[in-house]
Image: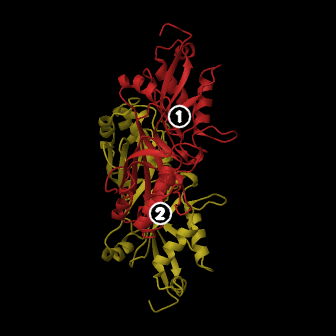
Chain colours: A red, B yellow
Amino acid sequence: MTDVNAGVRIRLDLAYDGTDFAGWAVQPGLRTVQGTIEDGLSRLMRGVEPRLTVAGRTDAGVHARGQVAHVDLPMRAWEALAGRSHRDPETVMRTRLSGVLPPDIVVLGVKVAPSGFDARFSARERRYVYRVSDRPESRDPLTRRYVFWYPRSLDVTLLREASRGLTGLRDFAPFCRSRERATTIRTLVEFSWERVESGVDEGLVTATFRADAFCHSMVRSLVGAVLAVGDGRRDLAWLRTEAVATSRRSGIIVAPPHGLTLEEVAYPPDDELAERANSTRAKRTLD
Amino acid sequence: MTDVNAGVRIRLDLAYDGTDFAGWAVQPGLRTVQGTIEDGLSRLMRGVEPRLTVAGRTDAGVHARGQVAHVDLPMRAWEALAGRSHRDPETVMRTRLSGVLPPDIVVLGVKVAPSGFDARFSARERRYVYRVSDRPESRDPLTRRYVFWYPRSLDVTLLREASRGLTGLRDFAPFCRSRERATTIRTLVEFSWERVESGVDEGLVTATFRADAFCHSMVRSLVGAVLAVGDGRRDLAWLRTEAVATSRRSGIIVAPPHGLTLEEVAYPPDDELAERANSTRAKRTLD
């Protein structure tokens, strides 16, 4: 850390309410999470044009409680942050960045990243939760921004049966919005449904997803397809046919974004990061 | 129920996100909960001017998960609601009222009220919860509309010590905003603090209040006063002095409204209602 011309990579742990953002990724003229944070960082560090790399590029309206991003900064600018205070740059950046960001973005943590860390390519697993209220008495106006109010009753046993066949290593093309000519093969480690009896989601029906990575709109397409079975409008045979199609078809309704929250991104232990970084650098299609 | 000129009293169970309302009570030109529901009811029932009576007149920004109101309707209009459908008027009103209300108000229930029921004067107890996040890592942008982000760390043992002396039958004048020449004597049954380890409020510090009734801004003044002790800025001796003042003084900071939610209103069993209605009709100062 003696070369002042060197860079330093900072890991940011973030939470946001996606309701009033046009998604993560910067888009000209629109309020985005990335754009808002990059603007905030540039106010903190004059002369630096910070560019964030993120673990999960959430769509418009999708939330995050455990988003992870990284930004590369000149060491000189980073060390100057603390100024004449006796605090470390991490604390100063978290405090000052929180001060300039709007209340729908929270900076949960700021840390110098371990060697080889890349918020996107080092990520081993992403966990998303989709929240549904299927009973009028469980509709809470205070949580409506992140809970999908479903107009029909759901049978959790049916939801589980429907999702059981959709996990593992497979081609998720029928559940992916084609964005580029990229692979749609993913390993879906978990796709589970629960009618929650206690805890923070009491009274709701939730779907939990864990995978190495997700293609565009994959979680919401899977939710939409399985909900149609869970309320009785479709049967399992329909879903089995849809699931082996070679591309997305119109029969699958994509569930609305506001029920979806990126809860956690998992990374390997620090000592495995550098090795992993080299081996996965080529897989540019993962998201 | 054979006299079609008679009236019928309807009990409404309600929840709302108070963020975008100027409080419960109708005010000309402002968006209020009462005004919005009354407008919705009059759209359902032509020629009726519904007037709601409520258990807790919440201030601007205060939320409710268990608010109760009643409305008196002509029996003729009530019975006409179901029309030629085979559904009961309760179900029809809940469905249709939900259809015309904005998503920040939820109709949890519609029922013909038992004899002698008055949403305001029959209420035996109101329960409010005030929610605080005192740690940066527990700040969740998705719950920020109903959680007060406190800038200092709180000592729950101190909070409990401070609130212990404030319960029971006493004059809450030092914690009441004088609105009229009304009594400020109340019975505060519960004023308890908890650092919540599990459940829907996991990670938060909460204050629970139960009383026969509350004077204006009483809960938020009590929260403000006790928080000042709980973060070390004030000591118990200060609070003891404030608590016996004859009126509100400037030293007590009223906590912001968005942390406060009316969770529940308790009523006596149906067979006690008529008797109770007669005995409490005179106490017009309760709120």
Q: Chain of mark 2?
A: A
Q: Residues within 10 Å of mark 2 (few under 14, many from 20)?
A: some
Query: Mark 2 highlights which residue?
Result: A150
Q: Nearer the viewer, residue B37 or A73?
A: A73
Residue at the location (35% across, 27% down)?
A269
Q: In what element is the residue under mark 2?
A: loop
Q: Using the numbered discs, state the Cα–Cα distance from disc 1 to disc 2 in whole angstroms.
A: 36 Å
- Residue at mark 1: chain: A
> Taking B6 as reference, is A201 above or below it?
above
Residue type, label 2: Tyr
Residue name at image x 56 percent, y 46 percent: A59
Residue placed farthest to the right in the image? A29
Residue B236, relative to residue B247: is it above or below? above
- Mark 1: which secondary structure? loop
Amino acid type, mark 1: Arg
Residue at numbered disc 1 = A284
Q: Residue A279 location in percent, x, y?
A: 44, 27
